[in-house]
Structure formats: structure tokens, C-alpha cells
Image (cartoon, grey):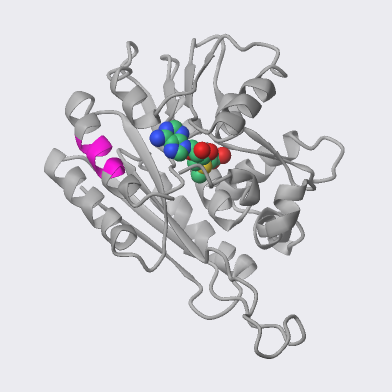
Amino acid sequence: MFSYRHGFHAGNHADVLKHMVLIAVIKHLTAKPTALTVVDTHAGAGLYRLDSDFAGTSGEAQDGIVKLLASPLAAEPPPLLADYLQLIASFNPSGRNRIYPGSPFVTQALLRKEARDKLWLFELHPTDAKALAEHVLQLEDQRMLAIKREDGFEGLRALLPPPSRRALVLIDPSYEIKNDYGRVALCIQESLKKFATGTYMVWYPVIPRPEAHELPRRLKTLSNQAGKPWLHATLNIGQAPERANTHTPGEKPPRQGLTASGVFLVNPPHTLKAALLEVLPQLVETLGRGRGQGHAVESGG
Ligand code: SAM
């Protein structure tokens, strides 16, 4: 079960989509003075070195944040992307892009001490949970944070509804076990019963697997049944053209890695759809590698 390590994938195109949307949602929710609770059910290690062995082995950031930062789009980004790039830059004050913040640090950077916002982080992997706890020690004020080395789906149950009645739940499993797809759907179903006004954000990989295909459909049905608005967006960077001379004849071509991913939100900010419709075509143009590249944004409720 524990073969997935987010360090291999940090800063890839899927992280660009997920963290850009996460920032937009938190900025919207923190515009009101009332305390906000954020629950990150699958937190990861929190911070990643883009020059580490992990990141270097897969090089996924090269087709994500690294490519984006080197592109003309980074010089004149639309607002959603500008907020994301600014936050990434704040972790790299020297100007060299070496640190990539995961969802715990992206979120923590935007939460407000004075409003008594609260961040709950769940991470099961022993090594990543330990790394997360160590990374959090760097923060001046850790009082707004709680780290649990527990199952995030289970842990969430006890936290809803939050005392302030305002919450964002990020559900970002690794989907290394098929079961995760069903658990995500069940988690949304149960959570909407307990706390229907919360904002829920699910990330998922767009891969040729029936469960992955079904997940956004199930989430749409659950949102519609609960009478709640939803938003679904995907980013596909397409297949990398096979480069000549990178592998010998008869040998398998290099792995393409994940080409597409999606985010599904229940009770999204009303401004998010228009912002995504502006930014996603530009991201496809910048990060697109070839066959299959594209984006989609749909909403309902
Ligand atoms: N949310 C992180 C980010 O955006 O930076 C990335 C999370 S990564 C995709 C998924 C993480 O969930 C992995 O670190 C994995 O060890 C952890 N994990 C897997 N199953 C879990 C569970 N049931 N509860 C909590 N964490 C889990």
C-alpha cells in the first residue's frame, strides 16, 4: 500500500492544477472574517526539494512548474495563475526554484492567525508523516496546525461540522489502491449529509481505469442529489512525442507518466469557473506536449 511517495511527482502538471485551484478556493473563503477550518485528508510530506533524488528520478516537475516558470505565460499570468506563482516564489526567495510546497504549506501560507483558522493534516505513510512533522517545525507559529498519522477518511468524520461552520476539505489520495475511488465517493456522500455547506475539493488522475472514469460522474450525482453546486475541471498535457535516440530499438520507450488529472469541487467559489476558463487554455498551450492535450470545465447544481 505504501509505495506512493508524492516527492516523485511534486510540481508536476497535476500539482499545478490542484494547487492553483486550492489557492483560489482558500483566498475566496478567507475573504470573510469568520474562522475557516481546512482538512487535508491526504497531506503528503508538505515540502519537496525539486533538486532532490526523488524529483530528479522522475523529472515530473520539468513538465509542470519548471516549464511554466520558464514560459512567457509566467511573465504575464492571468490572476489565478499569478496567485499560484507568487506563492511558489515566496518559498524560493533566492529566485532559484528549488522548493515546492505541497498542499499543507500552500494552505498554511494563506490561513489567518487572527481569524483563528485551523488546519488539520492527515498522513498515513510513516516516512512522509515524519517528514511533514519535521517540516512544520520550521513554522514560527504551529498552533493553527494539527498533524495526525491516521487515515484521513476516518479522521474527517470526527471533524464535521466544524465549530465555525466554515470549512474546506481537500481529498487528494494517491489512488494506489482501487478502493480509494469508492472511499472518496462515500466520504463525499457522508460529509454532505453531516455538513452540506462545506466546500469539498477532490483531486483524481485521468487514467484508463473504469473507477477513475466513474469518479467524477459519481460525484456529480452525489452533488445533484444533495442539491449542491459543483465544478469539474481537467487539464491534459497530452503524450510527449517519442524522442529519437532516447531508447534503443526493441527497448520500451520512456514512460509518459500521468498525462491528465481533474479536480471536482462541491460548493465551489462562484468566481472559479470563469477564472479557470481563462487560465486553462493558456496552461494547455504552455504545458501541452502533443496528442490528447486539452482541458475541460463543466459545472452544475
Ligand atoms: N495533498 C498532497 C499535496 O498536494 O501536496 C499530496 C498527497 S499525495 C497525492 C497522497 C498522500 O496520501 C500520500 O502521501 C500517501 O502516503 C497518503 N495516504 C494514502 N492513504 C492515506 C489515508 N488513507 N489517509 C491519509 N493519508 C493517506
Query: In this rendering, is residue 189 above or below 175?
Result: above
The residue depicted at 61 percent of the width and 32 percent of the height is 127
Which residue sits furthest left? 225
Residue drawn at 57 percent across, 27 percent down: 129
Magenta residue span: 183-189
The quadrant in which the N terminus is found is: top left
* Majority SS type along the magenta span: helix
| Residue 21 at x, y percent in the picture | 49, 44
Residue 67 position within the rendered picture, expressed as x and y whole percent measured from the top left: 71, 61
Residue reaching furthest to the right: 94
Q: Quadrant of residue 41?
A: top left
- Residue 282 to residue 22: above or below: below
Residue located 34% across and 31% down the image: 153
Tally the marks: 0
Q: Residue furthest bottom?
A: 249
Inspect this view and state whether residue 285 appears.
yes
In the drawing, does residue 165 fall left or right of residue 294? left
Q: Residue 52 versus residue 266: which sits nearer the camera?
A: 52
Q: Is residue 216 magenta?
A: no
> In this rendering, is residue 250 above or below 207?
below
**Picture coordinates of residue 45 (x, y %)?**
61, 33
Q: Residue 130 placed where, x, y %? A: 62, 25
Residue 24 appears in view: no
